[in-house]
Image (cartoon, rainbow, N blue to C red):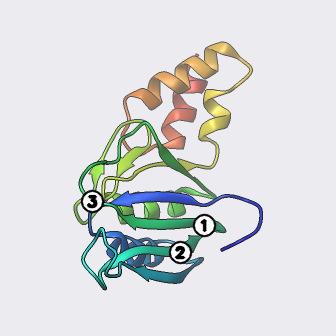
């Protein structure tokens, strides 16, 4: 990986390769890159995975097996802008299932602790509606949801 641009580095505690495989199974537009291994110089055990390069939806990532010193938090999340409810359902179920955790307002944590926001088409338009009353009603509806339901947000916005 070279040139301009940026790569997101995700710090794992021994699960970088499993995480890359998992994300490549969830996001269909992806590819696995190089896998770098620790050598005799350490700090990890020789021949264990140090870094895994992968790309999903055009975004470059490196999974680093850095150890238990750091963990993920909701302070950083990845937004998935979905074309429709079916796509939002797919990502919500894929990422929150198998040990993941549903949050509120479209947020979830996957089984590795990485935070995601699953945003169906139309949700942002509703909470950013130029009519403050509509925006407020849509936002209030969203605040009571886990997975975002755009139809319900629209009904709330239109209720005034």
Residue 130 position within the rendered picture, expressed as x and y whole percent measured from the top left = 74, 21
Find out whether the residues at labels 1 and 2 contact each other: C-beta distance under 8 Å: yes
| Residue ID for mark 2 | 54
Give above or below for 40 relative to 149: below
Residue 46 position within the rendered picture, expressed as x and y whole percent measured from the top left = 28, 82
| Residue ID for mark 3 | 67
Task: Please state if 142 lies on the left or on the right of 58 as rendered.
Answer: left
Task: Please state if 22 lies on the left or on the right of 117 as rendered.
Answer: left
Mark nearer the N terminus (1 vs 2): 2
Residue sitting nearer the eye, 29 or 51: 51
Q: Residue furthest right?
A: 4
Residue shown at the point (45%, 27%) measured from the top left: 141
Between marks 3 and 2, how big is the CA–CA gap?
19 Å
Residue 33 position within the rendered picture, expressed as x and y whole percent measured from the top left = 55, 82
Give above or below for 124 relative to 43: above
On residue 60, which mark appears?
Answer: 1
Mark nearer the N terminus (3 vs 2): 2
Say which of marks 3 and 2 sits in front. 3
């Amino acid at each position: 990986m070279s040139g301009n641009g940026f790569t997101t580095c995700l710090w794992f505690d021994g699960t970088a390769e499993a995480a890359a495989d998992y994300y490549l199974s969830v996001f269909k537009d992806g590819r696995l890159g190089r896998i770098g291994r620790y050598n005799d110089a350490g700090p990890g055990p020789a021949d264990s995975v140090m870094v895994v390069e992968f790309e999903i939806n055009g975004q470059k990532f490196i999974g680093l097996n850095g150890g238990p010193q750091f963990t993920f938090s909701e302070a950083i999340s990845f937004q998935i802008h979905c074309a429709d409810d079916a796509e939002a359902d797919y990502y919500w179920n894929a990422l929150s299932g198998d040990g993941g955790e549903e949050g509120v307002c479209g947020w979830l944590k996957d089984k590795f602790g990485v935070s995601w926001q699953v945003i169906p088409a139309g949700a942002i338009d509703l909470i950013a509606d130029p009519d403050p009353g509509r925006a407020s009603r849509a936002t209030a509806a969203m605040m009571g949801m886990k997975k975002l339901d755009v139809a319900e947000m629209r009904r709330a916005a239109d209720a005034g």
